[in-house]
Image (spheres, rainbow, N blue to C red):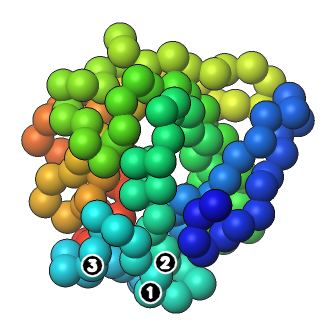
Amino acid sequence: MPLYDPTVYKEPDGSEWIHIFHHNNPATNLFASTDSFLTQVHKDENRWFDVAYCYKLQKYEFLLKQSLTAGGTIYKYRWIQDINPMVAGFNDVPRSKVTYITSTGYTDPSTAYGGLCRGIGSTYLRANNNAASNWYGAIGATATY
């Protein structure tokens, strides 16, 4: 089980999920570029990164939940990619190589994002948004956008 949140969460469709990353209030709470993302990072209850758990998996289906403001609407994005994001390059996860789950309750990101891959600049991981030079969809951000 993941190190920081051992709870198994259930979605309405019966699928079960583990929580491998958390970043609350990223405008104030940032990670550091020296953090040990290759293993795990626990800064505090607002910032932790256990995505290295993906090395134990052979299937990569992700459920990302976010709200734009505290207490705001929660948006859920769900997709499948065939490569571990910890080793994926930008060209490994374009939109054409990602399967989106868009059933009831999930937002369709297919017009904006592909899968997760290694980051550049101020993030450890990022979403492929068809522009290799930026870091939209940052996971493990060390600076505010």
Q: Are the residues tagged 2 and 1 within 8 Å (C-beta)?
A: yes
Residue that protrudes farthest toward the top in the picture: 96
Q: Where is residue 119 in the image (x, y as percent from the top left)?
A: 22, 51
Measure how far apart labels 3 and 1 are at the Cα level: 9 Å
Quadrant housing the C terminus? bottom left
Q: Earlier in the sequence, mark 3 or mark 2?
A: 3
Q: Determine the image quadrant of residue 128.
A: top left
Q: Are the residues tagged 3 and 1 within 8 Å (C-beta)?
A: yes
Amino acid beneath label 2: Arg
In the picture provided, is 6 more to the left or to the right than 3?
right
Measure how far apart labels 2 and 1 are at the Cα level: 5 Å
How many numbered marks appear?
Answer: 3
Which residue is pictured at 33% across the width and 78% down the height?
Answer: 31
Which residue is pictured at 56% across the width and 38% down the height?
Answer: 62
Q: Which of marks 3 and 2 is in front?
A: 3
Q: Is residue 118 above or below residue 26?
A: above
Mark 3 packing: few (<14 Cα in 10 Å), some, or many (20+)? some
Q: Determine the image quadrant of residue 140.
A: bottom left
Can the viewer see residue 100 in this picture?
A: yes
The residue that disc 3 covers is: 35
Which residue is pictured at 61% across the width and 41% down the height?
Answer: 63
Quadrant housing the N terminus? bottom right
Amino acid beneath label 1: Lys
Amino acid beneath label 3: Asp
Q: What element carries label 3?
A: loop
The residue that disc 1 covers is: 43
